């Protein structure tokens, strides 16, 4: 109530009259007038009550022009003060429950969800069919569709898939998917959104980050290896400071190098460095603390008890962390040495290119120099990472209004420290990023990160988080729909699960709550339209990369190789022609690389692949835990006409014609049904009903007739590959059917 009605004028930014409502201590402090707003236990003598009940417009609070308090709200404040004005701790900062308190014969998830449903007089939905649950789990855990061969390997027959799966079958399926190398790809994409991963530096030049992919590979491998989240954190925050650190630990620190880097001429290098440090502080706050602390760069937090000094305590951890580079088989080189060496090489190249020279005499030398320079960045052993500065260390001061040119030196140096979220912790003056990492994974000193992590994992498995603002756990964030469940899962994650991402996911997906049908129930819509109490599962469109992946997979085109450098799928010519700092042009990959998973698409900050941006892929300039989910006509046009999706429809048609070849003894109508049923099985992971096949039969016949009379259009539609022994009109007709199936809502949607 105080945050909603008072904090805009009496918060962290504005403290009108010298009064703030951000904490009990501040509310008890005398205002500029010398009057104390609260008299705990004596509401009648409290200035706050006098002001909110005053009829004098000069004294009444809130003032005219703002929403007035209701009678009920005034009574609440009166009763609160009368009862002692106790200040409850924020739910996100409270200690986690003991693991022993969670013992029960009931599934941890189902116990809390069902208890809330019982209290509301509601019932859960029936379990989803085996086919729908299998599709859901494949998409959630690997981002791919189940192949018929995989279902056979898992001994999941058609009969079993038409019924709900047993708990044993679900556990077996979960173990299979968690062991898949594609699990790491799927969940790496979530983390890379938070890490603001990109393959280019940003700003006007937006030059390629030649070694960015190494961090992506590290994340995939770490997730596949089920590296405990505690270690996952330590290595990214301070891998270079770990005793006996490895090359992989150095690569992990590239989390901090995903910032934008301004390579424009005339840029103030210290200003650019400061911006990168500020970005790192804000990112750590959002990713691990679920708290937007970036505003504290300039002023105290307007709504939470975070001070500007808290921001610069975190800033001090990163102020002496510079980027270095190493060939992983020699001594690290610092940034200045690298820039000087690289500049010297480029100067030589530019001198050669600037001259009018005889190609015969000089082209080989120029090419050798260019190859050498490119190899400097592209060497398999070359990578950049974060490294602590050992000499000429920088001092940290609060910047007045966030301006790096106005350090408040007279106010004293700011030493590394933690924001006062869950208690004050003393640190030695020489504390470093490893101390920060250890605090982030200490559930006693800091119970916030386990809640933040669990909340985001839940979000990826249900389409919405328990606390529906995953990057805002402060006072402006939402209270969780199931606070006891969030606490219990966070405690289980740390104590029973050993910070294991895989075990946490396994726990959730084996619950009956996760396995519910997603079919909407009219009788629940008016009671819980947002499905916050989980009377069913949620249906939602898959993300941009996954949509392309499953389209290529269904068409039989997908290259499933894991890891490696970024690739360049086809782009519209107007975008592909754009240059990268004048030294690199987009050239579409050929062969298998053309069809690699979307995770590996070269991601340029200033020109995102339209197939990604159209389907709400973020631009990576800021950390993002939750993607937007829009529904626009442009998306339908993309899946119908974009080159990638059109090529996939052509390939899908060829796959159907090849997998179900003509058979002289089989009637055409039976063969058509066989192909249509195969299309449903491959694209929708289930058997088609006769009612569903009928409109596709009609479309097929109509298309055959049309393309027999329009041969040129048939040739254009089926593309450059015409199967041997197949009529052009026939292949074009099946391409039409394939395009329709790949555009069904059910295909685009996670059930």
Image (cartoon, rainbow, N blue to C red):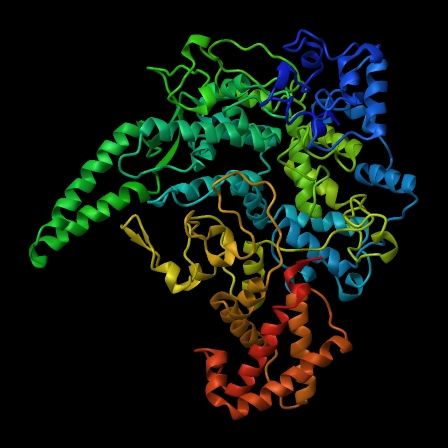
**In the displayed structure image, the side of residue 402 where residue 442 appears, left or right:** right
Q: Position of residue 611 (x, y in %)?
A: 50, 59
Q: Position of residue 475 (x, y in %)?
A: 68, 28
**In the displayed structure image, the side of residue 213 where residue 64 appears, left or right:** right
Instruction: Residue at 56%, 41% (x, y): give it.
Output: 624
Question: How many labels, in total?
Answer: 0
Instruction: Residue at 35%, 59% (x, y): give it.
Output: 587
**In the displayed structure image, the side of residue 390 where residue 402 appears, left or right:** right
Instruction: Report which quarter residue 551 is drawn in.
Output: bottom right
Determine if residue 146 is in view.
Answer: no
Q: Position of residue 292 (x, y in %)?
A: 58, 30
Q: Quadrant of the N terminus?
A: top right
Outermost residue to the top: 34
Instruction: Residue at 24%, 37% (x, y): give it.
Output: 342
Tell which of 182 and 266 is nearer to you.
266
Q: Quadrant of the C terminus?
A: bottom right
Instruction: Report which quarter residue 277 is drawn in.
Output: top left
**In the displayed structure image, the side of residue 139 where residue 518 appears, left or right:** right
Is residue 622 depicted above or below 52 in this figure? below
Is residue 87 depicted above or below 626 in this figure? above
Q: Position of residue 742 (x, y in %)?
A: 61, 68
Determine if residue 669 is in view.
Answer: yes
Instruction: Residue at 42%, 52% (x, y): give it.
Output: 607
Tell which of 476 and 122 is nearer to you.
476
Is residue 309 depicted above or below 239 in this figure? above
């Amino acid at each position: 109530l105080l945050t909603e009605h008072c904090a805009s004028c009496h918060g962290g930014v504005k403290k009108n009259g010298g009064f703030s409502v951000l904490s009990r201590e501040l509310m008890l402090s005398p205002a500029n007038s010398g009057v104390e707003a609260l008299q705990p236990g004596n509401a009648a003598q409290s200035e706050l009550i006098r002001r909110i009940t005053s009829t004098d417009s000069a004294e009444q609070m809130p003032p005219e022009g703002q929403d007035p308090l209701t009678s009920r709200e005034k009574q609440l404040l009166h009763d609160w003060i009368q009862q002692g004005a106790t200040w409850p701790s924020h739910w996100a900062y409270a200690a986690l429950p003991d693991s022993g308190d969670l013992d029960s014969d009931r599934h941890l998830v189902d116990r809390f969800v069902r208890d809330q449903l019982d209290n509301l007089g509601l019932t859960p939905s029936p379990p989803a069919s085996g086919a729908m649950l299998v599709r859901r789990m494949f998409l959630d855990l690997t981002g791919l569709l189940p192949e018929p061969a995989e279902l056979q390997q898992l001994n999941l027959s058609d009969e079993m898939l038409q019924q709900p799966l047993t708990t044993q079958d679900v556990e077996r399926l979960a173990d299979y998917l968690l062991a898949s190398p594609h699990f790491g790809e799927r969940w790496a994409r979530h983390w890379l959104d938070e890490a603001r991963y990109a393959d280019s530096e940003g700003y006007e030049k937006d030059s390629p980050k030649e070694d960015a992919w190494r961090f992506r590979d590290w994340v995939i491998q770490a997730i596949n290896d089920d590296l405990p989240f505690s270690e996952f954190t330590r290595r990214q925050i301070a891998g270079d400071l770990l005793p006996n650190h490895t090359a992989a630990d150095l690569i992990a620190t590239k989390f901090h190098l995903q910032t934008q880097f301004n390579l424009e001429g005339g840029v103030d290098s210290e200003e650019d460095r400061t911006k990168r440090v500020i970005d790192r502080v804000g990112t750590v706050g959002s990713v691990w603390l679920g708290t937007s602390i970036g505003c504290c760069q300039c002023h105290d937090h307007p709504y939470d008890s975070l001070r500007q000094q808290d921001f610069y305590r975190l800033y001090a951890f990163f102020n002496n962390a510079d980027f270095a580079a190493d060939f992983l088989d020699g001594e690290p080189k610092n940034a200045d040495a690298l820039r000087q060496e690289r500049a010297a090489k480029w100067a030589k190249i530019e001198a050669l290119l600037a001259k009018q020279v005889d190609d015969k005499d000089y082209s080989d030398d120029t090419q050798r120099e260019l190859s050498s320079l490119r190899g400097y960045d592209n060497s398999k052993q070359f990578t950049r990472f974060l490294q602590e500065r050992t000499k000429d260390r920088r001092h940290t001061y609060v910047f007045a209004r966030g301006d790096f040119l106005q350090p408040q030196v007279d106010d004293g140096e700011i030493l590394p420290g933690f924001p006062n979220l869950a208690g004050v912790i003393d640190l030695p003056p020489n504390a470093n990023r490893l101390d920060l990492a250890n605090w982030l994974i200490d559930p006693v000193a800091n119970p916030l990160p386990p809640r933040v992590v669990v909340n985001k994992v839940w979000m990826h498995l249900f389409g919405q988080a328990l606390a529906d603002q995953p990057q805002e756990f402060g006072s402006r964030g939402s209270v969780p729909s199931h606070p006891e469940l969030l606490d219990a899962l966070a405690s289980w994650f740390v104590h029973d699960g050993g910070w294991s991402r895989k075990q946490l996911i396994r726990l959730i997906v084996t619950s009956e709550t996760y396995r519910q049908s997603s079919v909407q129930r009219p009788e629940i819509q008016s009671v819980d339209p947002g499905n916050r109490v989980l009377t069913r599962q949620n249906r939602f469109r898959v993300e941009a990369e996954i949509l392309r992946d499953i389209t290529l997979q269904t068409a039989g085109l997908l290259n499933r190789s894991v890891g490696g450098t970024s690739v360049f799928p086809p782009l519209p010519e107007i975008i592909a022609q754009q240059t990268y700092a004048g030294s690199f042009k987009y050239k579409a990959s050929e062969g298998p690389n053309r069809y690699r998973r979307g995770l590996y698409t070269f991601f340029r900050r200033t020109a995102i692949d339209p197939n990604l941006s159209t389907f709400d892929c973020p631009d990576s300039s800021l950390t993002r835990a939750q993607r937007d989910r829009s529904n626009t006509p442009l998306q339908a046009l993309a899946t119908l006409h974009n080159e990638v999706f059109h090529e996939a429809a052509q390939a899908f048609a060829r796959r159907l014609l090849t997998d179900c070849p003509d058979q002289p003894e089989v009637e055409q109508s039976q063969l058509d049904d066989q192909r249509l049923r195969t299309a449903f099985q491959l694209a929708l992971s289930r058997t088609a009903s006769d009612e569903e096949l009928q409109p596709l039969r009609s479309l097929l016949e109509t298309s055959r007739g049309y393309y027999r009379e329009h041969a040129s259009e048939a040739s254009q539609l089926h593309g450059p590959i015409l199967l041997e022994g197949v009529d052009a009109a026939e292949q074009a007709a099946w391409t039409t059917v394939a395009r329709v199936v790949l555009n069904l809502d059910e295909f685009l949607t996670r059930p």
